[in-house]
Amino acid sequence: MTLGNKLLALRKKSGMSQAEISDELGVFRQAISKWETDQTTPELAKIKLLCKLYNISYDYLISESHNVFSENTYYKIYEAIETAFSKLEL
């Protein structure tokens, strides 16, 4: 399952619209649409907010989507997320 598929499923499960999610995250609704269709990926700060919003771990979001990336890329993403999360104060 891709990141976009997961984000779409989580949003639908929450019963929220793209507009509601965009308001919560401070982005345009079109950004949510692009994330859910794998056209773009959210910034790390937005991933942290999504995890809080949906009450999930960021591991869940990137696990199993590693098939989309090479193993090396997966670990670079994971390290970048760890570093970014440690610097963010939300």
Image: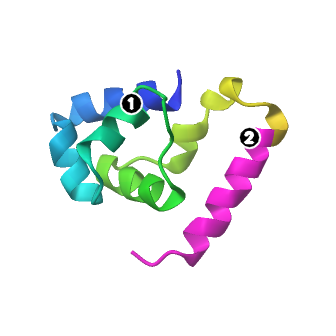
Q: Is residue 43 left or right of residue 17?
A: right
Image coords of residue 33 (percent x, y): 32, 33
Residue drawn at (50%, 37%), measured in percent from left and top?
40
Q: Is residue 59 left or right of residue 38?
A: right
Image coords of residue 34 (percent x, y): 39, 34
Return the residue at label 2.
Answer: 74
Other residues around mark 1 within 10 Å, as few (<14) / some (14–19) / many (≥20): many
Q: Is residue 7 at least partly visible in the picture? A: no
Measure the alpha-carbon separation of dots 1 and 2: 19 Å
Q: Is residue 12 above or below residue 85?
A: above
Q: Amino acid at mark 1?
A: Glu
Q: Amino acid at mark 2?
A: Tyr
Q: Which residue is at the front of the view, 36 or 6?
A: 36
Q: Quadrant of residue 7?
A: top left
Residue drawn at (23%, 28%), measured in percent from left and top?
12
Q: Is residue 40 at least partly visible in the picture? A: yes
The verdict on residue 82 being magenta is: yes
Q: Quadrant of the C terminus?
A: bottom left
Image coords of residue 43 (percent x, y): 50, 54
Image coords of residue 9 (percent x, y): 33, 26
Magenta highlight: main SS: helix
Residue drawn at (53%, 57%), measured in percent from left and top?
44
For the residue labelled by badge 2, is the local secondary structure a helix, a strand or a loop?
helix
Residue drawn at (45%, 78%), measured in percent from left and top?
89
The verdict on residue 78 being magenta is: yes
Tell me which segment is drawn in magenta.
Answer: 73-90
N-term mark: 1 or 2: 1
Other residues around mark 2 within 10 Å, as few (<14) / some (14–19) / many (≥20): some
For the residue labelled by badge 1, is the local secondary structure a helix, a strand or a loop?
helix
Return the residue at label 1.
Answer: 36
